[in-house]
Amino acid sequence: MKKFLWAYTIAIILGISFQGNAQSTEKSSGLLRMEMKKGEGNENEVKKEATRQDVSKSAEGSATFRMPVKKKEPAKVDNAPPVSVAVPIAMGSDVIGITWIAPESNLVKTSESTFLIRTTVNSDEHIRFINLFHNGEFERNIIPPVSNIRQMVLEEAMELELGSNILRVEAVTATGNKFESSVEVVYDITTAKYYALIIAVEEYKDENISDLDKPVEDATRFRDLIQSEYNFEEEHILLMKNPTKAEIIGTLHQMRTKITPEDNLLIYYAGHGYWDEEMKTGYWLPSDATQNNPVNWLPNTDLTNYLNVLKSKHTLLIADACFSGGIFKTRAAFSNGDMKSVEKLYNLTSRKALTSGTLKEVPDESVFIKYLIKNLEENTKKYLPSEQLYSSLREAVINNSPNIPQFGIIQNVGDEGGDFIFIRR
């Protein structure tokens, strides 16, 4: 009887112990999750639930920080710091640290002066703020909008200097712990693509339009020079010999899908030109042009329309033709050509023209192209703005021909004050 009572007492004690352990386990393993469907609950309930998310790491907050970036945004007068906006995102990688999305490698090159970095920041503690550094110098910090964030996707535009740029992201947690990661972005304008469309017309189907002797020969020499000595790759150069109007228009139309806002475009034309004084319009005469019917003449208005939609970084038009000066009405200011000026000129979009004369006829044997090629051959500078090229050949052309070469802005097609830069290999 005593043994029975003793066993019964032990059983009761064990039962009570098991029940307590079960309750303890249930309390410690319960996870607070917010699984609300659209239309359920109210705003206050959502806020209350969010404040309890730090019970479990899997329920931690996360945020994306994005700075809207425009490729061609004028400088801010007030120098106000950029503003980032935080929005919720889904949890990503659980790897603690900083993962780079852009750039994708530790070393990249770009021809643009602004680079958009994009990273994911994962922490096992709440993120207090993130610091950005450029070449060891503090740039700015970003503070999360709420205090319980452990993951962020960061997008920030960083201004670059010519050459190497070390961009560093440093995350600081609520307890003062730090972790960081760096990449190198090399700002080098030589990495930009240079396209050239070279048009030479010397043979005309209409017997009333006299043939020319040198355009194809001159254009070929120019093509060979920029390909061998300057930053033009063979596959990006197209030489059109005696094309029709349709072939020229078709080529310009196709280039709309090739040229990007980071590319540079040079258009060269040698052939007959015509100026209609009554209509105040200049024309190029393709090989199928006829004297008494302008249907196959190529007006400057068509050309400027294409220059407006070809969204290159820089476009330079070189025209060696009669009345070629009708493409523009204004003249550009001279630049000094040091590296700082080159960088500024390259950063600003340009639409410039360099022509063999004004609204007059030019001789068949082109003095203009002779000195254009000569100055490009003898140039010893790594970076040669087209305006400096013009200034170097202007006096020689004036002294050896009745014409005055012109340089200026092509109006109403997006020029922002920059210049086309010839880059020596």
Image: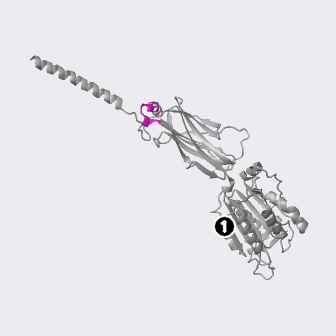
| Frontmost residue, 355 versus 135 | 135
**Position of residue 316 measured from the top left corner of the image (x, y, whole percent):** 75, 61
Is 200 placed above or below 132 here?
A: below
Which residue is pictured at 73% across the width and 50% down the height? Answer: 343
Which residue is pictured at 54% across the width and 45% down the height? Answer: 100
Is 220 placed above or below 304 here?
A: below
Q: Which residues are magenta?
A: 50-60
In the displayed structure, does residue 195 sit left or right of residue 60? right
Instruction: Report which quarter residue 328 is drawn in.
Output: bottom right
Per the image, label 1 sits on a secondary structure element best described as: helix
Write down the residue under mark 1: 234
**Position of residue 311 measured from the top left corner of the image (x, y, whole percent):** 68, 58
Secondary structure mostly seen in magenta is helix
56 in magenta = yes
| Quadrant of the frame with the C terminus | bottom right
- Asked which colour scheme the image uses, the reply is one colour
**Position of residue 399 measured from the top left corner of the image (x, y, whole percent):** 91, 66
Whether residue 70 appears in this view of the structure is: no
In the displayed structure, does residue 309 sit left or right of residue 47? right
| Frontmost residue, 254 versus 213 | 213
Which residue is pictured at 74% across the width and 40% down the height? Answer: 77
Q: Amino acid at mark 1?
A: Glu
Q: Which residue, as the protein is rendered here, is positioned at the far top?
A: 2
Q: Which residue, as the protein is rendered here, is positioned at the far bottom?
A: 207
**Position of residue 342 measured from the top left corner of the image (x, y, whole percent):** 75, 52
Which residue is pictured at 52% across the width and 28% down the height? Answer: 175
Whether residue 350 appears in this view of the structure is: yes
Is 118 placed above or below 254 here?
A: above
Label 1 environment density (alpha carbons within 10 Å; few <14, some 14–19, many ≥20): some
| Quadrant of the frame with the N terminus | top left
95 in magenta = no
Q: Which residue, as the protein is rendered here, is positioned at the far left?
A: 1
